[in-house]
Image: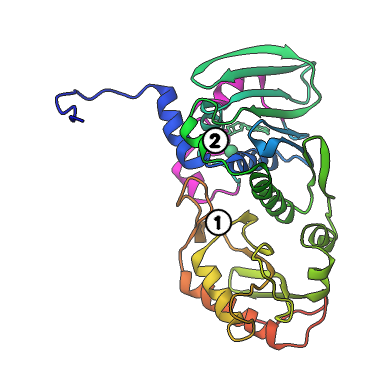
Amino acid sequence: MTKQTSERIHQLDNQLANQIAAGEVVERPASVVKELLENSVDAEATRIDIDIERGGARLIRIVDNGRGIHKDDLPLALSRHATSKIRSFDDLCAVASMGFRGEALASIASVSRLLLRSRQEGQDIGWQAVTEGRDMAVKVSPAAAVVGTCIEVADLFFNTPARRKFLRTEKTEFTHIEDVVKRVALANPDVALVLKHNGKVVRRFPAATNNPEVKLKAVCGSAFCKAAIAFSGELEQLKIYGWLASPNYHRSESDTQFIFINQRPVKDRLLSHAIRQSYSGLIPTGRFASYVIYIDCPPSEVDVNVHPTKHEVRFRNPRFVHDFLVKLLQQCLASEATLFDSSVAA
Ligand code: ADP
Ligand code: MG
């Protein structure tokens, strides 16, 4: 193949730019579910219904009872770099919402058939916008709706066959979705979530405003809860708390390992290292610890804009967080603490 070196530079069209961005944000159905649930949480929904068909490849439908989107903003919601969550660089440095990049819906819309229906308090009726992959001329029409937002993402990757080919079995894709829903459930005690697959309710996570253990049990199961030791500690503006399963409760899978920073589910190397170090020598090789750990700190102490998926974060002072976490966990594991009633002094 010859390289086209004589080509002049041209601006990519919007759709192609969106599809390129989608390559980073929308890896599989579970990434769509993650982005949509984060939007519902940002809209202060207290109830979210998630309907999945065929592992999400056929349909992902999310219905929430949140604030909704103004009719005139529906086309904007689907365009790139359009967000209601930040306005300035200063906002970005102190961002408290899950979203802020303004690109999830545009990316998802560019690789699926998408319907967005919404109604705000005070509007008599709802409005909806429908898009289909590259054809992004957004038409808004009236629709029957209750207050809140419904998004349907059908035929994900229908126009990007290479991506579609990488989808795993229905079961595997659904397992990834379930994992995302569990993380959102644990991060947001006030929100009730119901997850359906192919028409059947698979998971129900009740709202547990004053009783986080209810959520813990629904997500992690009663065996984890029996083995769990509650811990908490504070150092300067850093607060870390949660539950650790006692080392005797080691598992063949790492599916009960949850870390949240300012309510944001993360998978962070530094923190995983701290946890492994704390459990080292206590768990047989090849087995996994189980834990739910919440880290709260001022938003200015942590940069969440490291990667489009926001799974990674960067602390301003990583050593400080790492060492405090190790100290807390080691104290907790060394203590004879029992379920839900112990706390470790910093
Ligand atoms: P971001 O979340 O980064 O702002 P998105 O592309 O995910 O970008 O969403 C674009 C905008 O659409 C959001 O800023 C928000 O105003 C609106 N939006 C999306 N989903 C919802 C929802 N479920 N409820 C209310 N508003 C929503
Ligand atoms: Mg978003």
Residue placed under numbered mark 1 in the picture: 299
Q: Residue at x 83, y 39 (%)?
A: 200
The answer, for residue 338, to whether it is visible in the render is yes
Residue drawn 52% across the image and 42% down it: 27
> For the residue carrying disc 1, how many other residues have a C-alpha within 10 Å: few (<14), some (14-19), or many (20+)?
some
Magenta residues?
68-96
On whether ligand 1 comes within 8 Å of the CB at mark 1, the answer is no
Q: Amino acid at mark 1?
A: Pro
Q: Are marks 1 and 2 in contact (CB under 8 Å)?
A: no
Task: Give the camera-side residue of 204 and 298.
Answer: 204
**Is residue 185 placed above or below 15 in the rendered structure?**
below
Instruction: Give the percent coordinates (x, y) of residue 185.
Output: 74, 52
Asked if residue 73 can be seen in this view, the reply is no
Display coloring:
rainbow
Query: For the residue labelled by badge 1, is the local secondary structure a helix, a strand or a loop?
Result: helix
- Magenta-drawn stretch contains 95: yes
Q: Which mark is residue 174?
A: none
The quadrant in which the C terminus is found is bottom right
Q: Is 55 on the left-hand or right-hand side of 81? A: right
The residue labelled by disc 2 is 104
Q: Amino acid at mark 2?
A: Ala
Q: Which residue does the image show at 53% across and 78% down from the upper left?
A: 323
